[in-house]
Amino acid sequence: MTFRSKAFEIAQSRVSPVLTPPAEKVADLYGINTFSDDVMKTLLSAEAYTKVSNAIRSGSTIDIEVADEVSAAMKSWAISKGATHYTHWFQPLNGTTAEKHDSFFDLTIDGRAVEKFKGSALVQQEPDASSFPSGGLRATFEARGYTGWDPSSPAFLMDNGAGGKTLCIPSVFISYNGEALDYKAPLLRSLVMLDKAATSVCQFFNRDVNKVTPTLGIEQEYFLVDKALYYARPDLLMAGRTVFGHSPARGQQLDDHYFGSISPRVNTFMVDFEFEALKLGIPVRTRHNEVAPGQFECAPTFEEVNLAIDHNALLMDLMQKVGDKHNFQVLFHEKPFAGINGSGKHNNWSLSTDTGINLLAPTSKPKENLRFLTFLMNVVKAVHDHADLLRASISSAGNEHRLGANEAPPSIVSVFLGNDLTSMLEELVNKGEITLEKGENFYYKLGLTRIPNLQRDNTDRNRTSPFCFTGNKFEYRAVGSSQNSASPMIILNTIVANQLMDFKREMDERLASGEEKKVATVEILKRYFTESKNILFEGNGYSEEWIELAKERGLSNIRTTYDALYAYKTDKTISVFERTGVLNSRELHARYEIELENYVKKIQIESRVISDLALNHIVSTVVKYQFKLAQTARSLTDLEMLEEAEPIKEIIRDISSHVVVIKRLVHEMTESRKTANNIDDLFEKAKYYGSNVKYFFDEIRYHVDKLELLIDDEDWPLAKYREMLFLE
Ligand code: ADP
Ligand code: MG
């Protein structure tokens, strides 16, 4: 019995754990494991509560007395709910979440046990964090890293499974010099800048707006594989994706999985992690099957960007933990299975004001629609001017399999606005000179009264667009499923903030020179539209014609991660980031290096896994099978059944031809890896890995997948696609 068949047997006989439905109504569960606003209100003095609320709203600092009061309240709340430890929970640049648990338990000088957690421990900690990537920001002589409390994201209790709970305090992670070593620090900076820039532009239209909050709703796609089968795939285990595997006879061509009924086993898992998510204040709302077999999606309701990103990171962690209980491995890799749709993380992004307006939602009122068009066009212009940077923000070894691979968003950044909106903007420009008529029909002349009732989701075609307008928000669809959304959101917030600053400056100049406000706005928007029109695309983003057309339009089509990442270091990028203060050039450079290093490591690991599997699992199995065939052929020959022996010999030869090529290719790939490892320059190394080493992946795969069809099914060592993907 092979390991694989044993695994399959186990997977077939799984029984879902019985869920005890929580006593409370679902709504009552919501947020019970978070140190929420309500909890603070009950546990803090009125003065401390006000100070914390102000800090959350306006970013004002919290003095140590207040921190002491908050920490005391947090401690008693957490302990009363069964917590034994606390940790600063942060998001280092290796793409995971990090925690180092400290016990509340402490000893006094005279040896008595006490439970301790002071304000200073809440506000700042110094984890031994020297092994997190810093891209050279921490020289060895100053290897310290600090985590600092982010009061705008509520602390929460994480169940460790073994009885104890840990109080997790969302935090930033910075170096001794204050440079960002994580995703959250620059994200928070970008949100402050965007708020400022958007609020000042809003004031041209609504004087009562004092704050603009960027919002984000993240749709998370993932695959589920039974644990036993997962362990029967060393490639999934080591690299998160299958490096070999012949397509099953039936894939997704029948389109019968998408939105189909969810199997009971999967459904039980979903219900379980959703309960846990709700307790942590994650507003999970939709669940459904995705396009590919074995693929699913989970989408919480949108929240403030910072919260949405923390919640997504937490949700991924939670899904994995709950998955263990259900014997599922959750695959977040962008492309776990070749020939089958990959996974993305769709980032729905918008801007909302403290007066309750969604700035990207058109309305029926002409005045409001000029505001809507202003924000819409500023986003389009920002994306147009910094398309390469947006492309860089979603580049990784995993996402490289999706982007431009004919089934996921293309590697060309374009914006979908929908025909209605595009033709309206065109009309606006083509009206030519603006006649300075005042009054109601002023707008009518500009075509502004007639913003059509946009269909909220004219999806079919915008599915192929990496960045599309969906009626009241933009959806950045090209983000990879395993990525931390902060990376694209930092970029998007920053380029839009920068763009709004430009808009404001020009408006101020025009107004100072006596131009009428509406005229000035329309004039600027017309120019933006003309300047960024070439990035608008309504057609099929997966088509060959688009690649050609995009080339004619002069749009970038960057296919590889190492080339895409370059945008992090250009003068243009540095100047935008330094102007807004989101990242300095050292921090940008560090990010560039970390991403490149990550890329090298991923390809290196995959290459090693391929060598190992090809030689120690595939070739060795195949040779044994050949021996069986040879014995059969010899027996037939002994019986003088030469004709009957011939087809068997033919199979032996066929198998041999593949084995010979596999052995040669693995050898060549290993040599190529050696060459790559000797390259000092990081970019050149990444390029060598991404082109020369990676070149062998598909070559080797081709022959291994052929062998999968030649070898007796009983002997094949790796779990097959049909076994992993069609499990009920
Ligand atoms: P659906 O009915 O398909 O869920 P929606 O357009 O309501 O369609 O939502 C799609 C995704 O967009 C959801 O993840 C949702 O949370 C998010 N979303 C909706 N409105 C906003 C908004 N104003 N800002 C950010 N995300 C939003
Ligand atoms: Mg989706």
Image (tube, rainbow, N blue to C red):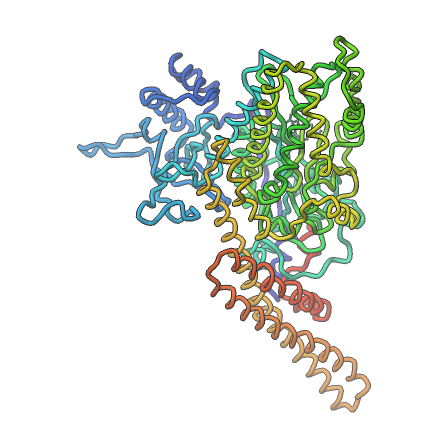
* On screen, residue 647 above or below 353: below
Closest to the observer: 19 or 223?
223
Quadrant in the rendering for residue 164: top left
Task: Provide residue 487's location: percent of width, then percent of height.
Answer: 54, 39
Task: Provide residue 120's location: percent of width, then percent of height.
Answer: 32, 29
Camera sees residue 586: yes
Which residue is located at x 75 percent, y 8 percent? 439
* On screen, residue 721 above or below 146: below
Closest to the observer: 227 or 708?
708
Task: Provide residue 535's location: percent of width, then percent of height.
Answer: 71, 38
Q: Residue furthest top?
A: 439
Which residue is located at x 61 percent, y 25 percent? 503
* On screen, residue 194 above or below 672: above
Task: Provide residue 435's location: percent of width, then percent of height.
Answer: 77, 16
242 left or right of 585 in image: right
Camera sees residue 328: no
Which residue is located at x 40 percent, y 12 percent? 46
Quadrant in the rendering for residue 203: top right
Displayed-image quarter of ligand 2: top right
Which residue is located at x 80 percent, y 29 percent? 423
186 left or right of 285 in image: left
